[in-house]
Image (cartoon, rainbow, N blue to C red):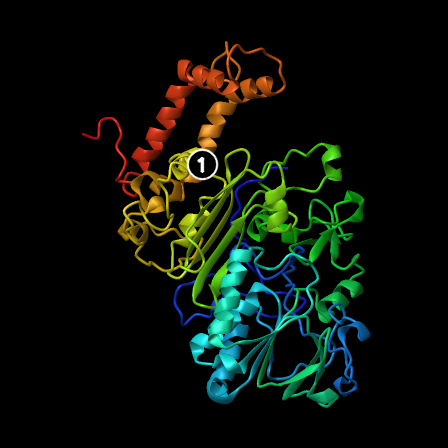
């Protein structure tokens, strides 16, 4: 099911747990926590909607110790993994889970008030990208690397949070250079040797080999986001169907028709036979937009009734197309951005081995801090973007490259194969991009972009792609090509379908035939007029383009 372009939904105060949640995005100011940079497309959790209701978030949670005595020298094989167990005890005052800006500010206050930068030992427990951004934050605040303990619990999947060996290698080298202590495959066993755990003074862990104990002044938890006990109890008391997540149908309904839900807190009903797909696989802003659209008719009776979809569609889960985006400042002061299509997580090596993978454009390398990777799929569309740079870059512009055809990027593939694009961060003459910071991805700053020295994605030809109205132009062009503008000819879209279904025999290559029909019919002047109207209407923002009559 195709969906409309999404806009971020507004938040409301949760009725299940009264707290003010704020959406936090990547920023270049080092006074802002790099650990806030969790993924621009993903609000912190899930929406539980009911007329007059509010929201509740799936969040980082407190880990549940296995409570084994490490003096008996147990290993991980001898203890049960407690990741799925709920911790219901009192939360220690120096234990932190970072789910919003307020949590980050509370942690910052604790660091300043308890001399953590000079004499504290900080434990970071988890193996998500948040652990890396937290390490970088602590290093920037002045905490010594030898006092930072990154404890990674046993992975639940062979897919890492970065899923790129080159980037992971750079992070490992940066952690080693900073003196950060890294422990792998460790399970939390006890706080304070099983005694009263507030505050935490020591934390014990088991591993596949031997247990160990660490001193602790602060404890950060970054386990997989899940439903906390309070939320589960609220669902259970409301008689909502729960199966590891809150169960919904394709229209966001729970088993209570008056309650809707969305986000990573939810899962689709088993009747869809799609347990591997959940809302966490998609862009959360797009999910929120669709939920808002579905509920709008409840609040605005003047809206025209929406055409009900065919009954068969109710047996399918909706598929959304918005990009999944994550990024942050990683150890080594690497600025990281990853943009990809919604998909079931798959190791990068497995993706590359597929026959229909497409091609890759890779410039620079992680050691030089100028790594730029673009995956072009078999349809020549930009499907994945990965950036790792020592200097800030215009992240919001790079995000807009997702879904573009490589020919719209000035024939990127042909230029790359001809050796004309040695570095996507620089132009052919080697001019380095002037750092402009990492802007909010919802705002595109043209003054910043135009002030940069020329590189491939700041040359004049691509400025129109970064304009916020470019999506409207694409929709207009698609409308022209899919409409029957000439009574004697099918639309270009219909013509392409007929060729694909072999309904017509061609004396030439399909691409050449479609190109010739486009050139010789009314479609070309209509497309040209639409493009020129777009440039003329936005000429204040796009002064680098010319059109007939400008001179």
Q: Quadrant of residue 318?
A: top right
Residue bearing mark 1:
406
Above or below, comparing residue 474 to residue 152 in the picture: above
Q: Position of residue 394 (x, y in %)?
A: 38, 54
Q: Secondary structure at mark 1?
A: helix
Q: Residue at x 37, y 48 (%)?
A: 423
Q: Quadrant of residue 73?
A: bottom right
In this view, the residue in front, 516 or 304, is 516
Q: Quadrant of residue 79?
A: bottom right
In this view, the residue in front, 428 or 378, is 428
What crowding class fits label 1: few (fewer than 14 Cα within 10 Å), some (14-19), or many (20 or more)?
some
Which quadrant, please, contains the C terminus? Answer: top left
* Image label count: 1
Q: Residue at x 75, y 84 (%)?
A: 70
Please state if 243 lies on the left or on the right of 324 as rendered: right
In this view, the residue in front, 120 or 59, is 120
Q: Position of residue 488 (x, y in %)?
A: 50, 9
In this view, the residue in front, 331 or 393, is 331
- Quick check: can you spot residue 223? yes
Q: Position of residue 275 (x, y in %)?
A: 75, 49
Please state if 44 lies on the left or on the right of 186 as rendered: left
Q: Residue at x 52, y 76 (%)?
A: 180
Above or below, comparing residue 538 to residue 133 in the picture: above
Q: Position of residue 63 (x, y in %)?
A: 69, 74
Above or below, comparing residue 500 to residue 291 in the picture: above
Which quadrant, please, contains the N terminus? Answer: top right
């Amino acid at each position: 099911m195709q969906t409309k372009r999404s806009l971020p939904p507004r938040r409301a105060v949760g009725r299940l747990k009264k707290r003010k949640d704020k959406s936090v995005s990547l920023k270049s100011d080092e006074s802002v926590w790099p650990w806030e940079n969790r993924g621009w497309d993903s609000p912190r959790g899930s929406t539980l909607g009911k007329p007059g209701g509010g929201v509740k978030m799936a969040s980082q949670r407190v880990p549940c110790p296995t409570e084994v005595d490490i003096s008996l020298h147990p290993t991980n094989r001898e203890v049960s993994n407690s990741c799925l167990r709920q911790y219901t005890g009192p939360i220690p005052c120096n234990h932190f889970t970072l789910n919003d800006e307020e949590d980050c500010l509370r942690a910052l206050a604790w660091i300043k008030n308890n001399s953590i930068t000079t004499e504290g030992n900080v434990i970071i427990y988890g193996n998500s990208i948040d652990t890396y951004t937290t390490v970088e934050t602590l290093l920037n605040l002045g905490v010594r690397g030898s006092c930072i303990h990154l404890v990674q619990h046993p992975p639940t999947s062979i897919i890492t949070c970065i899923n790129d060996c080159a980037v992971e290698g750079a992070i490992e080298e940066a952690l080693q250079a900073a003196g950060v202590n890294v422990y792998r495959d460790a399970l939390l066993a006890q706080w304070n040797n099983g005694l009263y755990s507030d505050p935490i003074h020591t934390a014990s862990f088991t591993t596949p080999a031997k247990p160990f104990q660490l001193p602790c002044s602060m404890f950060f938890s970054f386990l997989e986001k899940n439903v906390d006990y309070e939320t589960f109890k609220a669902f259970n008391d409301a008689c909502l169907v729960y199966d590891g997540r809150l169960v919904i149908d394709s229209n966001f309904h729970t088993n209570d028709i008056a309650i809707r839900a969305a986000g990573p807190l939810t899962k689709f009903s088993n009747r869809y036979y799609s347990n591997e797909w959940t809302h966490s696989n998609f862009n959360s802003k797009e999910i929120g937009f669709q939920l808002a659209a579905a509920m709008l008719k409840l609040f605005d009776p003047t809206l025209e009734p929406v055409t009900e979809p065919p009954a068969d569609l109710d047996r399918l889960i909706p598929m959304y197309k918005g990009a999944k985006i994550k990024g942050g400042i990683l150890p080594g002061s690497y600025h990281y951005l990853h943009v990809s299509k919604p998909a079931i997580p798959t190791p990068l090596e497995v993706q590359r081995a597929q026959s229909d993978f497409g091609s890759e454009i890779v410039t620079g390398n992680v050691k030089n801090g100028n790594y730029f990777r673009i995956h072009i799929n078999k349809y020549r569309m930009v499907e994945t973007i990965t950036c790792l740079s020592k200097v800030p870059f215009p992240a919001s512009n790079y995000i807009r490259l997702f879904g573009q055809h490589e020919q719209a990027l000035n024939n990127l593939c042909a230029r790359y194969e001809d050796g004309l694009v040695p570095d996507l961060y620089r132009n052919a003459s080697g001019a380095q991009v002037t750092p402009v910071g990492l802007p909010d991805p919802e705002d595109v700053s043209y003054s910043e972009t135009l002030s940069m020295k020329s590189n491939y994605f700041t040359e004049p030809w691509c400025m129109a792609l970064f304009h916020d109205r470019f999506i409207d132009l694409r929709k207009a062009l698609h409308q022209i090509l899919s409409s029957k503008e000439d009574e004697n000819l099918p639309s270009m879209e219909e013509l392409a379908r007929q060729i694909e279904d072999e309904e017509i025999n061609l004396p030439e290559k399909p691409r050449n035939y479609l190109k010739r029909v486009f050139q010789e019919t009314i479609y070309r002047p209509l497309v040209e007029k639409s493009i020129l109207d777009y440039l003329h209407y936005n000429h204040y923002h796009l002064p680098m383009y010319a059109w007939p009559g400008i001179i």
